[in-house]
Image (cartoon, rainbow, N blue to C red):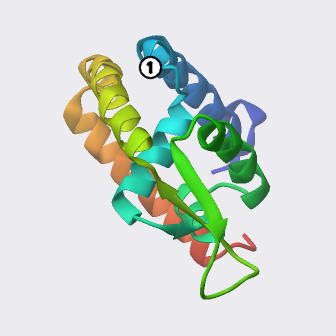
Amino acid sequence: MEDLLNPAHCVSNNLHQTARAVTRIYGEEMRPSGIKRSQFAILGYLGKLGTSKISDLADVLYMERTTLTRNLKPLEKAGFISIRTSESDARSREISLTREGKAKFTDARKLWRKAQSRILETFGAEQWHALEADLLELREKIRQNPGI
């Protein structure tokens, strides 16, 4: 354990460096769609969730609410999402995917699949399944113990 306390083994740095390398590939493949990987994720989750409160979507995406709000502005301006005051709680805002947003997600998904395939061919599907399970477990442990 002591050797892992060396900054060269920093969990955060290693995850960020890997994320940047992987994001570069998704960015290259998805550039023709005109949306970023983070925007693609937002559209995808909204397609799955339907209408969502901003705070709920931020939780699902593991994003700060203010960061999510900043990412929503260009999607709303492009007409891909609709943001309105919640009917059940005037203090909350709800987001939903528009018809244009659904079409944009469908088109971008084809490009996303190319990026996903590149990563899986490079890393290996079995290795990805194992890593994905480990990352999910880490996120859940952190969520359950935020003070660690």
Instruction: Using the rendered image of the protein, determine whether residue 17 is visible from the camera's viewpoint.
Output: yes
Which quarter shows the C terminus?
bottom right
Residue appearing at x 75%, y 45% in the figure: 70
Q: Seen in the image, is 102 located left or right of residue 25?
A: left
Residue appearing at x 63%, y 51% in the figure: 1
Residue appearing at x 77%, y 35% in the figure: 7
The percent position of residue 88, horizontal first and vertical second, equals: 60, 88
Name of the residue lying farthest toward the bottom: 88
Q: Nearer the viewer, residue 37 or 52?
A: 52
Instruction: Using the rendered image of the protein, determine whether residue 3 is visible from the camera's viewpoint.
Output: no
The percent position of residue 145, horizontal first and vertical second, equals: 64, 76
Residue appearing at x 70%, y 43% in the figure: 73
Q: How many residues crowd around disc 1 within 10 Å: few (fewer than 14), some, or many (20 or more)?
A: some
- The answer to which image quadrant residue 136 occupies is bottom left
- The answer to which image quadrant residue 124 occupies is top left
Q: Kindly state the secondary structure of the residue where label 1 is placed.
A: helix
The percent position of residue 42, horizontal first and vertical second, equals: 51, 47
Q: Which residue is mark 1?
A: 33
Q: Is residue 108 above or below residue 96?
A: above
Q: Is residue 136 above or below residue 147?
A: above
Q: Nearer the viewer, residue 85 or 13?
A: 85
- The amino acid marked with disc number 1 is Ser
The percent position of residue 4, horizontal first and vertical second, equals: 66, 43
